[in-house]
């Protein structure tokens, strides 16, 4: 897995708060490395920009990164790029790969052994879009940062 910059990714200013891009390859540990990049990115957002990132959002970000990178490595030839962004309201995970076929989340089927990745990403994301790109596709998932009111109240009572 390749990355640019001293912080395991190229951090760039944006209309949002912070972004970082990572070039991924199919080497051993690529998915785990992508998750580590995501956690380091969130840690920098907390430290450098004082963004509140609840544990739920950290966990969901790792899950989304895992599922999207796994699918890209399994179904797309060539390179994979991951871009992370954060604002006070959301974490944005974008994955670009070279496969032109757009994936579709399948109907839920408890008997199906695999191919649940996009279903999972869709279920945990506030927003999910799959777009064709000039040389492949981009999948973008938004994960809400503030805890939903019911979850915050339940934790307060625990």
Image (cartoon, grey):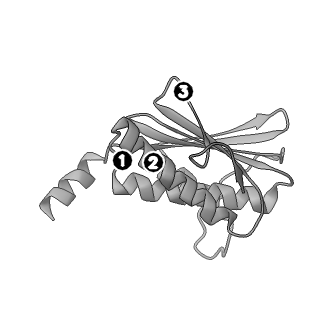
Q: Is residue 113 above or below residue 89?
A: below
- The part of the image, by quadrant, that contains residue 33 is bottom right
> Is 108 drawn above or below residue 15 in the view shown?
below
How many other residues sit within 10 Å of disc 3, few (<14), some (14-19) or many (≥20)? few
| SS state under label 3 | loop
Which mark is drawn over residue 53? 1
Dot 2 lies on which element? helix
Relative image position of residue 53 (x, y in whole percent): 36, 47
Residue 120 appears in the picture as rendered: no
| Residue 139 on image: x %, y % | 66, 43
Task: State the SS at label 1.
Answer: loop
User: Residue 109 location, x and y as percent?
Assistant: 61, 69
| CB under 8 Å between discs 2 and 3 | no
Determine the CA span between mark 2 and mark 3: 15 Å
**Badge 1 vs badge 2, beta-carbon distance below 8 Å:** yes
> Which of the image's four quarters has the C terminus?
bottom left
Residue that carries the numbered disc 2 in the rendered image:
42
Please name which of the two marks, 1 or 2, marks the residue nearer to the observer. Answer: 2
Above or below, 112 relative to 34: below
């Amino acid at each position: 897995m390749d990355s640019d910059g001293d912080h395991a990714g190229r951090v760039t200013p944006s209309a949002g708060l912070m972004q970082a891009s990572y070039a991924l390859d199919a080497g051993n540990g690529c998915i785990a490395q992508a998750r580590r990049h995501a956690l380091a990115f969130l840690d920098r957002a907390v430290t450098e920009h004082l963004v509140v990132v609840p544990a739920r959002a950290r966990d969901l970000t790792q899950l989304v990164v895992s599922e999207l990178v796994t699918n890209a490595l399994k179904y797309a030839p060539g390179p994979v790029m991951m871009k992370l962004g954060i604002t006070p309201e959301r974490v944005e995970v974008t994955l670009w790969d070279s496969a032109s076929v757009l994936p579709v989340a399948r109907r839920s089927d408890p008997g199906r052994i695999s191919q649940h990745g996009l279903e999972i990403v869709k279920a945990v994301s506030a927003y999910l879009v799959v777009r064709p790109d000039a040389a492949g596709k981009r999948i973008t998932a938004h994960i809400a940062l503030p805890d939903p009111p019911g979850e915050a109240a339940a934790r307060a009572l625990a």
